[in-house]
Image: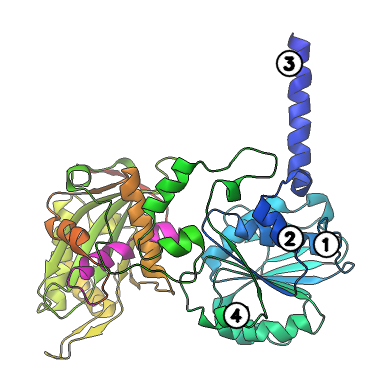
Amino acid sequence: MTAGLATLARAVDQLHKRTVADPLAYWTPTAPQLEFLRDPSHMRLARAGNQVGKTTMGLVDCIYRCLGAHPFQPVRPAPIEAWIIVESWESSLSVQSKLWALLPKDALVEDTLYIQGKGFKGRHPLVRFRNGSIIRVRTSNQGSLALAGSTIDFCMLDEPPPEAIYNEIVPRVLRNHGRIIFTLTPVGAPLGWLRKLVEDGRVKDFVFPLTVENTTPIGSRPLMTAEQIEAFSESVLPQQRAQRVFGDWESLWTEGRVFRMFDPARHVKPEVPVGEALIGVGIDHGTEVGAQVGVLVAMVRDAGEGHPRFWVLDQVQTDGQTTPDQDARMLLDMLRRAGLGWETVDLWVGDRRVYGRKNGSLKSNAMLMSAMERALRLPTGSLPFRIKTAYKPAGSVFEGIRILSAAMLRGDFFIHPRCKRLADDIQRWDGREASENKHSIDALRYTLELVTRRLHNPTVLRLG
């Protein structure tokens, strides 16, 4: 019996090692992935809902072409040069992780180094194959000029790219009669130009909605159940449900309550985290009534299954007619009410500066930092922290609200009862940019950079 178990253990270990060394040998596509990989069109679009595996199908296609051996269609012999273009460095790290998990390690040059959480070695991520093929991972926010002057054989554009990037890529790829593929969910950027290319027949369009069938590897069990898909659909913002679930070009949603999953009885509680937590302060500047807002948030980055958990500990909100010195004192008082000091805050994030047209007032992060130095009686320019300007790429509003909505649905979001105004705004906001209920939600969203940018380490706090 013991000998049999030992033999089985060795067999499992060997299988695991082979799977890590050559993942593609054990990878099974879903029906949509197989359909996409078999198509020989020069330009293809995988327009899909979330969780359908569109990025994976694009990476698999890229790797096969770099190997010079594609099991689903004829390809040119290696070596080739392939590019993978993503929106930002943060999204690049996610794609690099998936790429590393799929790469056949024996096909790479010996000095290929991948570091979890940091990506491939070097300032510009680069994967080299023994046969001479290379994969470069680039970001679209490097600008179109960074792409000029290159001739490549294959390009994968993951998530909606700017039209300028596409216009730079086309001559670089088609000069060698290469291939361009798009793998995206149509949110976060204007895509009228890409839709026209599809309608004109220049890009072949594959649409894969999020269904049980479309997430089932051929001959295997489903990766998602109908219940899980329904739960995901409920967690998605109504403004984006058609795109994120069905891969539609646009949403048919009309204005209505955004945070439908928020329940005061469930989410408004005087709870605080115990042990390690990240502390963030989000600030929305304003000169109108209720527009100057500060929100104090504690967050546990991984509260189970990789999901974050949030506690809104306090908020301050004024009529916008305050001075920077008054704003600074209110923010510091907010920290004291929670039993915290300014030195315990991991991240301060403030909105871009605003100018009051009616009263000539100005609010900015720089002015607020100077006011904090005065309040703390510190010399000018010696504040040991800085208020970062909020990072606002295309789609950041919806992405932030998606994170909050999912946390609410899981029961990982709590608001202290003293944050009555924020609780009211969450229940009333209808998605309008000009809504008076949006200011406190914006301040709350800014603290999500604790999750989305991942540049901070938790500290042990005693909150209560």
The overriding secondary structure of the stretch rendered in magenta is helix
* Disc sitting over residue 228 in the figure: none
The three-letter amino acid code for the residue at tag 1 is Gln
Task: Report, in whole angstroms, how far the alpha carbon at label 4 lies from the one at label 1.
Answer: 25 Å
Extent of the magenta region: 434-454
Task: Report, in whole angstroms, how far the alpha carbon at label 2 lies from the one at label 4.
Answer: 21 Å
Q: Is residue 73 left or right of 170 when viewed as pictured? A: right
**Which residue is found at the position 60% from the left and 52% from the top?**
116
**Pointers 2 and 1 in contact (C-beta within 8 Å):** yes
Label 4 or label 1, whichever lies nearer to me, is 4
Q: Earlier in the sequence, mark 3 or mark 1?
A: 3
* Disc sitting over residue 73 in the figure: 1
Q: Earlier in the sequence, mark 2 or mark 4?
A: 2
Q: Which residue is mark 4?
A: 199
**Which residue is found at the position 22% from the left and 46% from the top?**
267
* Disc sitting over residue 37 in the figure: 2
**Pointers 4 and 1 in contact (C-beta within 8 Å):** no
The three-letter amino acid code for the residue at tag 4 is Glu
**Pointers 3 and 1 in contact (C-beta within 8 Å):** no
Q: Position of residue 90 (x, y in %)?
A: 52, 64
Q: Which residue is mark 3?
A: 5
Q: Position of residue 279 (x, y in %)?
A: 31, 54
Mark 3 is surrounded, within 10 Å at the Cα level, by few (under 14), some (14 to 19) or many (20 or more) other residues, namely few
Label 3 or label 4, whichever lies nearer to me, is 4
Q: Is residue 343 left or right of 391 when viewed as pictured? A: left
Name the quadrant containing residue 129.
Answer: bottom right
Q: Is residue 189 positioned above or below 347 on the image?
A: below
Q: Secondary structure at mark 1?
A: loop
Label 3 or label 1, whichever lies nearer to me, is 1
